Image: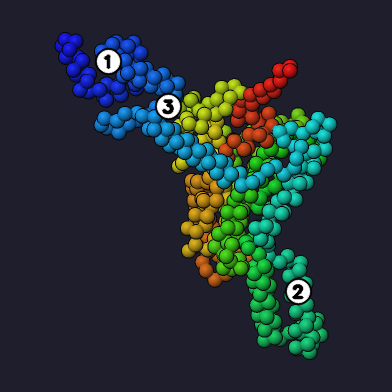
């Protein structure tokens, strides 16, 4: 093809040629082809090439002959900015949803208490922790049946009045079989009535004993990392109880509530840390009676080693890459979720008594309350009449004992700021990068 033919082809396909020159052709090629154009076209191409070389945008254009005009690029910038703003908003909403406006229970404890308060703060924090659990149980309307002592006093008073006022006998006098049968029936109905009345005043049966709250050991001062585990355990239990309370919110009594009773809650996979003294590792969490055993529940999740996880792992002092893919390990659980540089995964085992027909409501409420995934479930029938003998009034509907294993996700974007150095070390979290020094104004 001679020069005239090249020139004729260029004139006939000018739009396509300009597009190719602007977007993908190297400057040296642009200069070669531009030799066959007039000065006006060459100047226009050079001007656009210079503008594009200063922009860090890539454009995917629809098929056909489309010129990347200034208007098109501005529109693309608006779209990408909208997408970036949306992504930022989603990330912010995710953190807010996960955190739920929570902070630590006591200031000046995390990540480390002041040196001069290191022997005072732990006891103060434990006292505040115990108080917070009490407040939490009150907020979710948790309660227990009447105590045996109060029940005994009330029933004894009814017995005395029945014998002395209705039968006109001395309280110590023997009763004939008919009188004794009537008395036993009256006291049995009265006892069930007291249980029913107590159930009407609460949302669900739950006590502090079911939460395995850490006890204070005067001879052993906990470390900041151990206290952070207490704090983390509280956050996780707070999620479980409030999720259960949310499904009970429209019920006026335990008798008509979907969730009847919390038998126990155990938080697993908290970081293994040392105590404050030389006594060694902190006491481990108890195993929930009737739970799933120890198959992976207490094991520390090893750091991921494949390529995707390596891309997500930050360099020393850096931040995790939120765009890196999250590697799932399906050998550990149904969800495949494992702790990684973006979030930590805790396993929660809890056992509850529920209205059998409304179990799906309970599972849905628990799953949607936070980033929770139920990975195992066991349902067993239970005897409501036997429970009533112990003071627990569940109502007329059939109930079941349900044991669940649940994975909970905790975004480090908000939890990391409270973590003591020992916790960060246990989770392989690098130190934060030092803050940049403030700019010094120039001398005027």
Q: Residue at x 44, y 24 (%)?
A: 55
Disc 1 versus disc 3: distance between alpha carbons? Answer: 28 Å
**Residue 189: percent from the left, percent from the top?**
65, 77
User: Which of the marked residues, 1 or 3, is nearer the chain's N terminus?
Assistant: 1
How packed mark 3 is, by other alpha carbons closer than 10 Å (few <14, some 14-19, many 20 or more), is few
Pointer 3 residue: 57
Quarter that holds the C terminus: top right
**Residue 72: percent from the left, percent from the top?**
37, 32
Q: Nearer the viewer, residue 120 or 187?
A: 120
Of helix, strand and loop, which one carries label 1?
Answer: loop
Question: Residue 82: which numbered mark, if any?
Answer: none
Pointer 2 residue: 154
41 vs 188: above or below: above
**Residue 437: percent from the left, percent from the top?**
69, 21
Pointer 1 residue: 37
278 vs 290: above or below: above
């Amino acid at each position: 093809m001679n020069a005239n033919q090249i020139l004729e082809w260029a004139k006939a396909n000018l739009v396509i040629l300009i597009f190719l020159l602007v977007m993908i052709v190297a400057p040296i090629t642009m200069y070669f082809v531009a030799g066959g154009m007039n000065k006006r076209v060459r100047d226009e191409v050079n001007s656009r090439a210079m503008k594009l070389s200063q922009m860090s945008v890539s454009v995917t254009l629809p098929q056909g002959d489309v010129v990347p005009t200034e208007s098109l690029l501005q529109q693309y910038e608006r779209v990408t900015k909208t997408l970036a703003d949306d992504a930022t908003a989603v990330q912010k909403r995710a953190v807010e949803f996960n955190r739920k406006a929570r902070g630590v229970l006591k200031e000046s404890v995390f990540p480390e208490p002041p040196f001069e308060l290191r022997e005072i703060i732990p006891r103060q924090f434990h006292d505040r922790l115990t108080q917070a659990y009490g407040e939490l149980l009150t907020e979710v309307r948790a309660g227990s049946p009447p105590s045996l002592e109060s029940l005994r006093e009330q029933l004894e008073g009814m017995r005395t009045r029945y014998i002395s006022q209705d039968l006109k006998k001395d309280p110590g006098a023997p009763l004939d079989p008919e009188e004794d049968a009537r008395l036993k029936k009256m006291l049995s109905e009265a006892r069930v009535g007291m249980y029913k009345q107590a159930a009407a005043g609460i949302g669900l049966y739950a006590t502090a004993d079911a939460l395995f709250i850490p006890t204070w050991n005067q001879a052993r001062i906990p470390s900041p990392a151990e206290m952070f585990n207490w704090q983390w355990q509280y956050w996780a239990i707070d999620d479980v109880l409030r999720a259960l309370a949310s499904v009970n919110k429209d019920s006026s009594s335990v008798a008509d509530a979907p969730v009847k009773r919390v038998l126990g809650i155990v938080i697993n996979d908290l970081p293994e840390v040392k105590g404050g003294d030389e006594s060694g590792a902190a006491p481990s969490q108890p195993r929930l009676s009737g739970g799933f055993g120890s198959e992976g529940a207490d094991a520390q999740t090893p750091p991921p080693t494949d390529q995707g996880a390596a891309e997500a792992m930050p360099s020393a002092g850096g931040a995790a890459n939120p765009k890196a893919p999250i590697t799932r390990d399906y050998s550990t659980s149904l969800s495949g979720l494992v702790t990684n540089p973006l979030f930590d995964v805790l396993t929660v085992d809890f056992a509850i008594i529920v209205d059998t027909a409304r179990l799906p409501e309970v599972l849905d409420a628990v799953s949607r309350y936070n980033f929770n995934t139920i990975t195992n479930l066991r349902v067993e029938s239970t005897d409501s009449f036997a429970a009533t003998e112990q003071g627990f009034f569940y109502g007329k509907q059939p109930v079941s004992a349900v044991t669940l294993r649940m994975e909970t996700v905790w975004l480090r974007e908000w939890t990391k700021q409270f973590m003591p150095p020992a916790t960060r070390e246990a989770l392989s979290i690098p130190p934060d990068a030092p803050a940049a020094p403030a700019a010094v104004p120039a001398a005027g």
